[in-house]
Image (cartoon, rainbow, N blue to C red):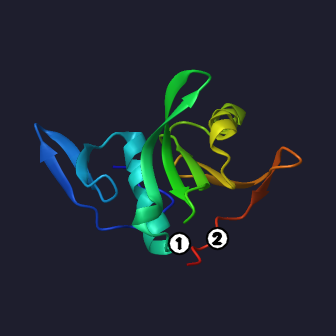
Amino acid sequence: MQVLNFPSYPFRIKNRENKPYIFDIIRKKYIQIQAEEWVRQHLIWYLIYEKKYPKSLINVEKKILVNGLTKRVDVVIFNKDGSIYLLVECKAPEIKISQETFDQIARYNLSLNAELLMVTNGLSHYYCVIGKEAENYTFVESIPEYIP
């Protein structure tokens, strides 16, 4: 698998019918490794082991309704009160992060009202803070470490 712009992690990987699977520590099951899943798994470990977010506050592939259509958000981190803190859109490394990517996560956020947004393809990571009153977003260097 491609080396990404994340630290190296001791993933549990196995082969089933000549296809690689990775153990998702949030969903607690093996998931077939596709390029986007490889990015998502690195991100999950990064959030837990580098940024110290508790597993209990992380949700993967959360279903949401956007304009009457069911969509899936790659990664969501909740605040303790159940509101959404961080919304993440993962793309495969070969997908260039574009305005379209930001438009996608912004549409999702209309119904979720996250405080922070992140977009990553595993090579490039972009973070922004949502300005509720001004209805804008400001790019920031990174997401903060979890504060209990």
Neighbour class for label 2 at 10 Å: few (<14), some, many (≥20)?
few
The secondary element bearing badge 2 is classed as loop
The vertical placement of 115 against 91, above or below, is below
Q: Is residue 122 visible?
A: no
**Whole-number angstrom distance, CA of label 2 to CA of label 1:** 7 Å
Q: Secondary structure at mark 1?
A: loop
Count neighbours of disc 1 (C-alpha within 10 A) and say few if under 14, some if 14 to 19, many if 20 or more: some
> What's the residue at 50%, 30% (across, down)?
71
Q: Quadrant of residue 65?
A: top right
Residue plotted at (53% across, 57% down): 77
Q: Quadrant of residue 58?
A: bottom left
The x, y position of residue 81, in whole percent, is 57, 62
* Residue 138 shows in the view: yes
x then y, percent, for residue 144: 64, 70
Kindly identify which numbered label has been placed on residue 3.
none
Q: Which residue is mark 2?
A: 144
Left/right placement of residue 129 relative to residue 3 reads right
Does residue 8 sit above or below 95 in this rendering? Answer: below
Across the whole image, how many numbered discs are drawn on residues?
Answer: 2
Q: Quadrant of the C terminus?
A: bottom right
Residue 51 numbered tag: 1
List the single residue furthest toward the top. Answer: 68
- Cβ atoms at labels 2 and 1 below 8 Å apart: yes
Provide residue 122's location: percent of width, then percent of height. Answer: 51, 51
Q: Between 1 and 52, which is closer to the camera in this rendering?
A: 52
Outermost residue, front direction? 81
Q: Residue at x 39, y 54 (%)?
A: 41
**Amino acid type of the residue that numbered disc 1 sits on in the rendered structure:** Lys
Residue 146, image x, y percentages: 57, 73
Q: Is residue 110 left or right of residue 74?
A: right
Q: Amino acid at mark 2?
A: Pro
Nearer the observer, 59 or 9: 59
